[in-house]
Amino acid sequence: MEVLKYIVMAIYAVVCVALIILVTKQNKEDSGASGTIVGASANNFYEKNKGKTAEGKMKRATIILMIAFAVLTIALGILYVV
């Protein structure tokens, strides 16, 4: 059981570092109040194909790492209670 704790902890550390790096590299998407007043269009070609761009892939990877972070946090909590 101790070996499993160390393996999960090592994976957890890698996920934490990767998540920190991805979050800090992302750009702010929100156009704020000026986008609301000017009327930023979400119906253009870029918005429809945003998932295929590097930003879209980075956002998807961040979401996956966040889910992995949450699952590993719960798993570590269970492993250290047992």
Image: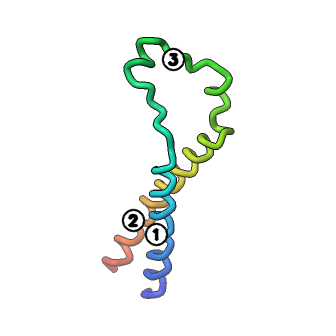
Q: What label does residue 73 carry, if any?
A: 2
Disc 1, disc 3: CB below 8 Å? no
Residue at 59%, 41% in the rendered image: 55
- Spatial CA span between label 2 and label 3: 38 Å
The quadrant of the rendering that contains the C terminus is bottom left
Disc 2, disc 3: CB below 8 Å? no
Location of residue 67 in the rendering, given as x and y in whole percent from the top left corner: 48, 55
Element under disc 1:
helix
Crowding at label 2, few (<14), some or many (≥20) Cα neighbours within 10 Å?
A: some
Element under disc 3:
loop
The image quadrant that residue 73 belongs to is: bottom left
Residue type beneath disc 2? Thr
Q: What label does residue 12 carry, if any?
A: 1
Mark 2 vs mark 3, foreground winner is: 3
Q: Which residue is mark 3?
A: 40
The image quadrant that residue 34 belongs to is: top left
